[in-house]
Image (cartoon, rainbow, N blue to C red):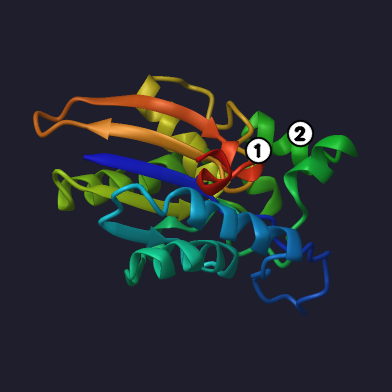
Amino acid sequence: MELVLVRHAEPVRIGPGETSGAPADPELTDRGRDQAERLGRWLALEPVHHIVSSPKRRAVETAAPLAAVHGLEVEILEGLVEWDADADHYIPMEELRESKDDQWQAMVEGRWEDYGGESPVRFRERIVPALDAVIDAHPGETVVVVCHGGVVNVYLAALLGLTQHLWFDPGYTSLSRVRAARSGARSLASLNETAHLYATREAIA
């Protein structure tokens, strides 16, 4: 089977204190909705048998155009939320990186608990079995999983035997493909595909 891991599209920024302490759950920006539409068009001609999404709004909204194209229902999997799912704010990773914010350093260094998140070890222990279960439930199929940058990072790190949890920067709506044989063998077929953000299959044809 083929597992297609997709990071969600660009979400709205939610600053600290803007949610009155409730977990931040931003919707997509206008650019993010365009990214999601492009993703749907790009995968329209590929065989997609099942779609899974994190329950967070930014993931669900990203999955919607793809589900519409293929006439599929989206399965919501609670176990795919990001390591900081309970945070009361959402600051885009690129902003944290450019401003050299301590939260960015904490992410890189694995100090996720400093900002109310799960520990990297517990996060990996949650994510890897959740995605392995998706693979086991869909032999011979292509399953698209719309989730979060941290989820994609730790699952692929486990697949490749890497100890670093956040080891690459997945683009918005990027695709990373995992091939899983019935024998249990798994391999990384592609990483961080973003061609659909610059072209569509219709334009190429």
Q: Residue furthest left?
A: 183
Q: What residue is drawn where x is 45% and y is 61%? A: 66
**Location of residue 202 in the rendering, given as x and y in whole percent from the top left corner:** 52, 48
In the picture, which quadrant includes the N terminus? Answer: top left
Give the SS element for disc 1.
loop
Locate residue 13 relative to residue 138 in the image: left or right: right
Label 1–label 2 contact, CB within 8 A: yes
Pointer 1: what residue?
A: 111
Check disc 2: other Cα within 10 Å, few if <14, some if 14-19, many if 20+.
some
Q: Is residue 194 visible?
A: no
Q: Is residue 94 visible?
A: yes
Give the camera-side residue of 151 and 41.
41
**Location of residue 110 in the rendering, given as x and y in whole percent from the top left corner:** 62, 34
Rendered view: 122 above or below 36: above
**Location of residue 17 in the rendering, given as x and y in whole percent from the top left corner:** 83, 71
Quadrant location of residue 194?
Answer: top right
Pointer 2: what residue?
A: 105
**Location of residue 73 in the rendering, given as x and y in whole percent from the top left corner:** 33, 72
Q: What residue is drawn where x is 14% and y is 45%? A: 139
Which three-letter amino acid code belongs to the residue tagged 2?
Answer: Gln
Rendered view: 38 above or below 157: below
Give the camera-side residue of 88 and 7.
7
Which three-letter amino acid code belongs to the residue tagged 1?
Answer: Arg
| Dot 1 or dot 2, earlier in sequence | 2
Check disc 1: other Cα within 10 Å, few if <14, some if 14-19, many if 20+.
some
Q: Nearer the viewer, mark 1 or mark 2?
A: 2
Locate residue 116 relative to residue 122 in the image: left or right: right
